[in-house]
Image (tube, rainbow, N blue to C red):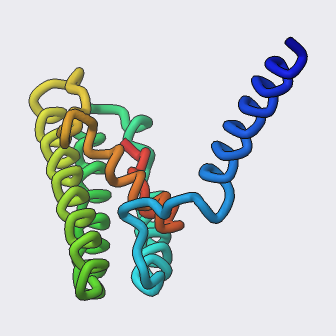
Amino acid sequence: MRALIAVAIVGMVSIWVYVMYLSFGPGRAAPPDELDDPTFAIAAQDRCREALDAVGQLPRAADTPTAAERADVIDEANGIFATMLDDLTAITPTGEDGELVTAWLTDWHTFLDDRESFATALRADSSARMLVSAKDGQHITEYLDAFAGDNDMPACSTPIDV
């Protein structure tokens, strides 16, 4: 009986050691959207930070007195983000990294379209809500944030200015 208990304990410990190895050790697989060359990610983090800083200088959309004024602030922020996306498109790498970046930028453009639709909706209905497009059954922001997180670009995550 003691031998059976000892085998069971060793088996459970072995399973947990293996799980920890896969989670934290060299057995951990890289995220599928992690770029091989970090050059784009470094430049993107800087460019996204600039855009966030510029948007941070605008009045907070939620603090504007009317829905129309809030829509104007969102439109101004959208212009800043559109310029950011143009700049990031200009430095998109080639190859597999380029394909990943292009997919991420496409998702960002979809999110920017969602923001523009929200600004338009606010002008017609002061109680309009921000709606985010879906991609593969999840909000597109999940993909934006995952790519930004996997590539150490926190400033390129979904902005929370709306």
The one nearer the camera, 82 or 126, is 82
Residue at left offset 44%, top offset 76%: 41
**In screen coordinates, is 135 left or right of 31?**
left
Whether residue 57 appears in this view of the structure is no
Classify the position of the C terminus by image quarter.
top left
**In screen coordinates, is 33 left or right of 104?**
right
Residue at left offset 66%, top offset 46%: 18
Where does residue 10 sit, x and y in percent of width and height? Answer: 80, 33
State which quadrant residue 80 falls in: bottom left
State which quadrant residue 24 falls in: bottom right
**In screen coordinates, is 10 left or right of 148?**
right
Where does residue 113 sit, x and y in percent of width and height? Answer: 15, 51
**In screen coordinates, is 136 left or right of 74?**
left
Classify the position of the N terminus by image quarter.
top right
Where does residue 84 sit, x and y in percent of width and height? Answer: 31, 73
Whether residue 7 appears in this view of the structure is yes
Residue at left offset 26%, top offset 36%: 138
